[in-house]
Amino acid sequence: MSTARARFVRITPRKLRVVAALIRGRTLEQALHILQNTPKHGSLVLWKLLKSAQAGAAQKSPNVQPASLRISALTIDGGPSLKRWLPRAHGRATPILKRSAHAKVELEEVK
């Protein structure tokens, strides 16, 4: 019914998938409540994403209730990585990958 995407989010996909597993398949109200009480950086990212999808669902059908919306699909994919270098001993350098993620959520109305 309604989809929302968050692209190029500066958090590793692995960390974001941990939070996504908590809310996958739940109703919108349950998911928002779980995310508000989860002390991880990924919970804020997914909370904003769900609010965006909720606003999109309200645009499509104004009489839809948040209690009747359910997360039908939530995917976390890897985005591009920033390549940085860390100086080490004897003139060497160690590569550092600063990863990013793409998140996509789909909401459906449960009757």
Image (cartoon, grey):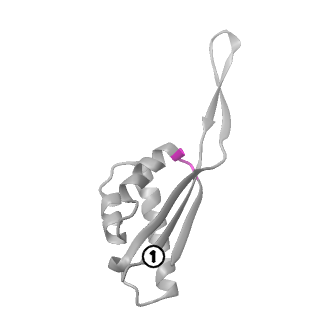
Give the mark count: 1
Where does the image place residue 41, in percent across and percent down from the top left? 43, 49
Residue type of the residue flagged with mark 1: Glu
As displayed, is residue 108 above or below residue 31? below
Question: On the picture, is 110 further left or further right than 52?
Answer: left
Quick one: SS at disc 1?
A: strand
Q: Quadrant of the C terminus?
A: bottom left
Where does the image place residue 38, in percent across and percent down from the top left? 32, 52
Q: Residue at 50% across / 65% down in the picture?
A: 105
Front-most of residues 97 and 29: 29
Question: On the picture, is 63 further left or further right than 101?
Answer: left
Where does the image place residue 76, in percent across and percent down from the top left? 53, 54
Question: On the picture, is 82 further left or further right than 55?
Answer: right
As displayed, is residue 108 above or below residue 10? below
**What residue would you read off at disc 1?**
108
Q: Residue at 48% across / 61% down in the picture?
A: 74
Front-most of residues 65 and 11: 65
As displayed, is residue 78 above or below residue 84? below
As displayed, is residue 57 above or below residue 20? below
Q: Residue at 51% across / 78% down in the picture?
A: 1
Decide whether residue 75 is among the magenta residues.
no
Q: Residues within 10 Å of mark 1 (few under 14, many from 20)?
A: some
Q: Residue at 40% across / 86% down in the picture?
A: 64
Q: Residue furthest top?
A: 90
Where does the image place residue 106, in percent across and percent down from the top left? 50, 69
Please give the range of residues in magenta: 9-13
Splitting the image into 4 quarters, where does residue 25 fall?
bottom left
Name the magenta segment's main secondary structure. loop
